[in-house]
Amino acid sequence: MGKKGFLLKTTIALAAAILAVSCETLPPGEPPRGAIIPEPELKIPQKNGAAAVNQFLMSLAMRCEPIAGAGKVPPLVSNRFVVSSERVNYLPMDVWLKLISMKLIRPVNDNGTTASYRLESEITKMNIEKTGGESKTYAWELKLRDLRKKKIVWDKVISFTVLRNP
C-alpha cells in the first residue's frame, strides 16, 4: 500500500473514533426544551432613502433574472413611477439612472412596442410616527414586469425613514 492506502485507512479509523466518542458525549435523559442558545436581539438601524436605493440596486443586480442574467446585452426597459405627494419622488429615478450608468438596462420611452420589461415603482407613506413626528416612514415597492408575458418577474418592498427637516 502506498500513501493513498494509508491515508484512506487513517481517515476511516479517525471517522469511526469520532462517531464512537460523539455518542457518549450526550448526557442521559430527555433533551432540554426550548432554545438551548437564545437568539441574539438584532438592532437593525433605520434605513434612509439612500440605503433603500442601494438595497434595490443590489437585489436587482443579483436576484432579478432578466437583469442579472442578461450578459453583454442588457434588456430594453421602460418605467412607470407613481408620483407621491411627499419629498421622496426622486428615489425611483435615482435607481433608474444608476441602473443605466451600471449598464444593467437599456432605457426606452415606450411601454411594450420595443421594451421587454417595465420597472414600476410606488412609494406610500406608512402610518408610523417616529421620534415625536420628526420623521416619516414609507413603504417603497419596486417591481419588474415582463411586458410580453404580462407577469411580474421581480418584486421587492422596502420600508425606510426620512427626517422631516434634515
Image (cartoon, helix red, strand yellow):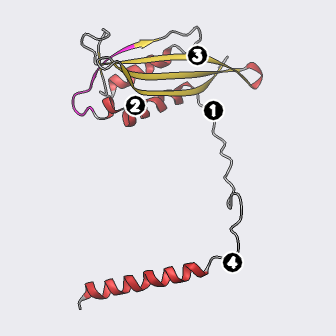
Give the SS element for disc 2. helix
Residue 46 is marked as: 1
- In front here: 33 or 88? 33
Q: Where's residue 72, x and y in %?
A: 21, 32
Q: Where's residue 87, x and y in %?
A: 58, 13
Dot 3: within a 10 Å radius of its alpha carbon, few (fewer than 14), some, or many (20 or more) residues?
some
Q: Where's residue 62, x and y in %?
A: 38, 37
Q: CA distance from mark 2 to mark 3?
A: 21 Å
Give the SS element for disc 3. strand
At a point 71% along the width and 65% down the height, the residue shown is 32
- In front here: 99 or 148? 148
Residue range of the region highlighted in magenta in the rendering: 70-79
Residue 124 is marked as: 3
Q: CA distance from mark 1 to mark 2?
A: 21 Å
Residue 28 is marked as: 4
Q: CA distance from mark 4 to mark 2?
A: 51 Å
Find disc 2 in the rendering and name its residue: 60
Amino acid type at image mark 3? Thr
Q: CA distance from mark 3 to mark 4?
A: 56 Å
Mark 1 against mark 4, which lies toward the viewer?
4
Q: CA distance from mark 1 to mark 3?
A: 17 Å
Q: Where's residue 141, x and y in %?
A: 51, 22
Dot 1: within a 10 Å radius of its alpha carbon, few (fewer than 14), some, or many (20 or more) residues?
few
